[in-house]
Image (tube, rainbow, N blue to C red):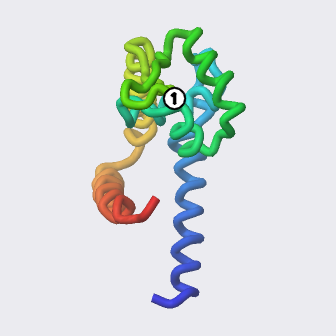
Amino acid sequence: MNNNELHDISDNLLNLLFQIHNRLFNPSEMVKGVSIPPSHVKVIFYLSQKKSMSVSDVAKCLDISKPNMTPIIDKLISNGLVNRYTDPNDRRKINIELTEKAHNLLKNKKREIKNNLFNKISTLNDEDLYKLDASIREMYDILIKLKK
């Protein structure tokens, strides 16, 4: 495939992301009713994909400076959403993990988001729903092949 075609695909993908953001999955809607800033929610969502991680690794993966991570983690701990502990294999490392409260918060938020998506897509006719489902499955299969 030539560069012009790749640029066209990139443009189309960017436009798709904007449509998803504007019509389906607005991040500001996701954090409604959550009494913590979006940067803190970002850490919680990231940790939900892992069992536990070092504070440094989370900061690196989320592109948050280490000095900014400390108050974020402190706030999450004070809200009962994260536990901090010393790595048993390397006492110099500090690891963090989500608490049961954080897992429940995520479960409730996920349910709320799914209900919101359900309500939005339920306005489509059957033909569009079948096309959407097939397209989502195909895009998913392709996107998981991309390097992070």
Residue 15 in which image quadrant: bottom right
- Is 74 left, or right, of 106 in this rendering? right
Q: Residue at x 36, y 61 (%)?
A: 139
The relative height of residue 85 versus residue 95 in the rendered view (above or below) is above
The image position of residue 141, as x and y in percent, is 30, 61
Residue at the spot of label 1:
92
- Is 28 left, or right, of 118 in this rendering? right
The image position of residue 108, as x and y in percent, is 41, 19
Q: Quadrant of the N terminus?
A: bottom left
Local SS, label 1 = strand
Which residue is nearer to you in this view: 139 or 44?
A: 44
Which residue is nearer to you in this view: 23 or 75?
A: 75
Determine the residue located farthest toward the right in the rendered image.
67
The relative height of residue 40 versus residue 8 in the rendered view (above or below) is above
- Is 116 left, or right, of 37 in this rendering? left
The image position of residue 3, as x and y in percent, is 55, 87
The three-letter code of the residue at mark 1 reads Arg
The relative height of residue 60 versus residue 85 in the rendered view (above or below) is below
The image position of residue 135, as x and y in percent, is 34, 60
Q: Residue at x 62, y 17 (%)?
A: 74
